[in-house]
Image: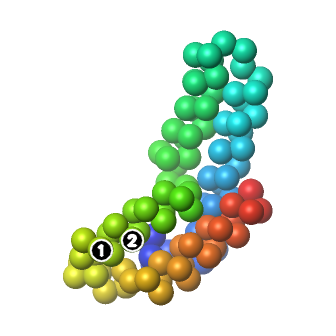
Amino acid sequence: GKCTQHWGTALIRGVGCNWMVCLAIWLQMIATEPISKFIMIWLPIELFISSGFDHLVVNEFLIPGGIIIGGTYVDSRVNWGNAFWFNFIPVTIGSIIG
Protein backbone atom coordinates (compact mmCIF):
# COMPACT_ATOMS: atom_id res chain seq x y z
CA GLY A 1 0.00 0.00 0.00
CA LYS A 2 2.31 2.79 1.10
CA CYS A 3 4.88 2.29 -1.68
CA THR A 4 2.28 1.93 -4.42
CA GLN A 5 -0.41 4.49 -3.61
CA HIS A 6 -1.24 7.28 -6.03
CA TRP A 7 0.80 10.48 -5.61
CA GLY A 8 -2.31 12.59 -4.98
CA THR A 9 -3.60 10.17 -2.37
CA ALA A 10 -0.34 10.36 -0.42
CA LEU A 11 -0.41 14.15 -0.66
CA ILE A 12 -3.94 14.37 0.75
CA ARG A 13 -3.12 11.87 3.51
CA GLY A 14 -0.12 14.02 4.47
CA VAL A 15 -2.26 17.15 4.59
CA GLY A 16 -4.86 15.43 6.77
CA CYS A 17 -2.26 14.03 9.11
CA ASN A 18 -0.51 17.33 9.67
CA TRP A 19 -3.86 19.03 10.17
CA MET A 20 -4.63 16.56 12.96
CA VAL A 21 -1.21 17.04 14.56
CA CYS A 22 -1.67 20.82 14.52
CA LEU A 23 -5.17 20.37 15.97
CA ALA A 24 -3.67 18.35 18.83
CA ILE A 25 -1.21 21.15 19.59
CA TRP A 26 -3.94 23.81 19.56
CA LEU A 27 -6.30 21.74 21.71
CA GLN A 28 -3.69 21.03 24.37
CA MET A 29 -2.88 24.75 24.57
CA ILE A 30 -6.54 25.43 25.39
CA ALA A 31 -6.72 22.75 28.10
CA THR A 32 -5.78 23.64 31.67
CA GLU A 33 -5.57 20.35 33.59
CA PRO A 34 -2.74 17.89 32.85
CA ILE A 35 -5.14 15.01 32.16
CA SER A 36 -7.19 17.17 29.79
CA LYS A 37 -3.98 18.17 27.98
CA PHE A 38 -3.17 14.47 27.54
CA ILE A 39 -6.66 13.74 26.21
CA MET A 40 -6.59 16.72 23.84
CA ILE A 41 -3.30 15.48 22.39
CA TRP A 42 -4.38 11.84 22.26
CA LEU A 43 -7.75 12.26 20.49
CA PRO A 44 -6.57 13.89 17.21
CA ILE A 45 -3.51 11.62 17.06
CA GLU A 46 -5.70 8.55 17.52
CA LEU A 47 -8.05 9.91 14.85
CA PHE A 48 -5.31 10.28 12.23
CA ILE A 49 -3.94 6.83 13.02
CA SER A 50 -7.34 5.16 12.72
CA SER A 51 -8.19 7.18 9.59
CA GLY A 52 -5.13 5.91 7.74
CA PHE A 53 -3.38 9.25 7.25
CA ASP A 54 0.36 9.16 6.50
CA HIS A 55 2.83 10.72 8.90
CA LEU A 56 6.30 11.11 7.44
CA VAL A 57 8.24 10.20 10.59
CA VAL A 58 6.19 7.03 11.11
CA ASN A 59 6.56 6.07 7.44
CA GLU A 60 10.32 6.67 7.61
CA PHE A 61 10.39 3.97 10.30
CA LEU A 62 7.84 1.47 8.95
CA ILE A 63 8.72 1.41 5.24
CA PRO A 64 12.48 0.84 5.66
CA GLY A 65 11.65 -1.79 8.29
CA GLY A 66 9.44 -3.56 5.78
CA ILE A 67 12.12 -3.36 3.10
CA ILE A 68 14.81 -4.67 5.46
CA ILE A 69 12.80 -7.68 6.66
CA GLY A 70 12.04 -8.72 3.09
CA GLY A 71 8.91 -6.98 1.90
CA THR A 72 10.30 -7.18 -1.63
CA TYR A 73 9.64 -10.92 -1.64
CA VAL A 74 5.92 -10.32 -1.00
CA ASP A 75 5.52 -7.42 -3.43
CA SER A 76 8.24 -6.40 -5.90
CA ARG A 77 7.05 -2.77 -5.80
CA VAL A 78 8.33 -2.38 -2.22
CA ASN A 79 11.70 -0.73 -2.81
CA TRP A 80 13.56 2.46 -1.97
CA GLY A 81 12.68 4.26 -5.19
CA ASN A 82 8.95 3.72 -4.75
CA ALA A 83 9.20 4.59 -1.06
CA PHE A 84 10.70 7.98 -1.89
CA TRP A 85 8.65 8.78 -4.99
CA PHE A 86 5.23 7.49 -3.91
CA ASN A 87 5.41 8.20 -0.18
CA PHE A 88 8.17 10.31 1.32
CA ILE A 89 8.05 13.16 -1.20
CA PRO A 90 4.25 13.61 -1.47
CA VAL A 91 3.71 13.13 2.28
CA THR A 92 6.38 15.75 3.01
CA ILE A 93 4.73 18.23 0.64
CA GLY A 94 1.34 17.39 2.17
CA SER A 95 2.69 18.01 5.67
CA ILE A 96 4.01 21.40 4.57
CA ILE A 97 0.63 22.30 3.06
CA GLY A 98 -1.34 21.01 6.07
The disc label shown at residue 8, or none: none
Q: As shown in the figure, which amino acid type bears the numbered disc 1?
A: Ile
Structural crowding at the residue carrying mark 1, measured as other residues with C-alpha within 10 Å and reported as few (<14), some (14–19) or many (≥20): few
Whole-percent x, y for residue 86 in the image: 54, 79
Looking at the picture, tell me which residue is in the foreground, 83 or 68: 68
Q: As shown in the figure, which amino acid type bears the numbered disc 2?
A: Pro
Q: How many marks?
A: 2
Image quarter hosting the C terminus: bottom right
Looking at the picture, tell me which residue is in the foreground, 70 or 6: 70
Above or below, 75 relative to 30:
below
Above or below, 32 relative to 61:
above
Q: Does residue 11 appear left or right of residue 75 in this picture?
A: right
Residue under circle 2?
64
Image quarter hosting the N terminus: bottom left
Determine the image quadrant of residue 43.
Answer: top right
Residue under circle 1?
68
Whole-percent x, y for residue 9 in the image: 59, 69
Structural crowding at the residue carrying mark 2, measured as other residues with C-alpha within 10 Å and reported as few (<14), some (14–19) or many (≥20): some
- CB-based contact (under 8 Å), mark 1 and mark 2: yes
Above or below, 53 relative to 88:
above
Q: Does residue 58 appear left or right of residue 34 in this picture?
A: left
Whole-percent x, y for residue 53 in the image: 55, 55
Q: Residue at x 75, y 34 (%)?
A: 26
Residue 55 appears in the figure: yes
Q: Gap in Å between the C-alphas at discs 1 and 2? A: 6 Å
Residue ranking furthest to the top: 33
- Secondary-structure class at tag 2: helix
Q: Residue at x 47, y 87 (%)?
A: 81
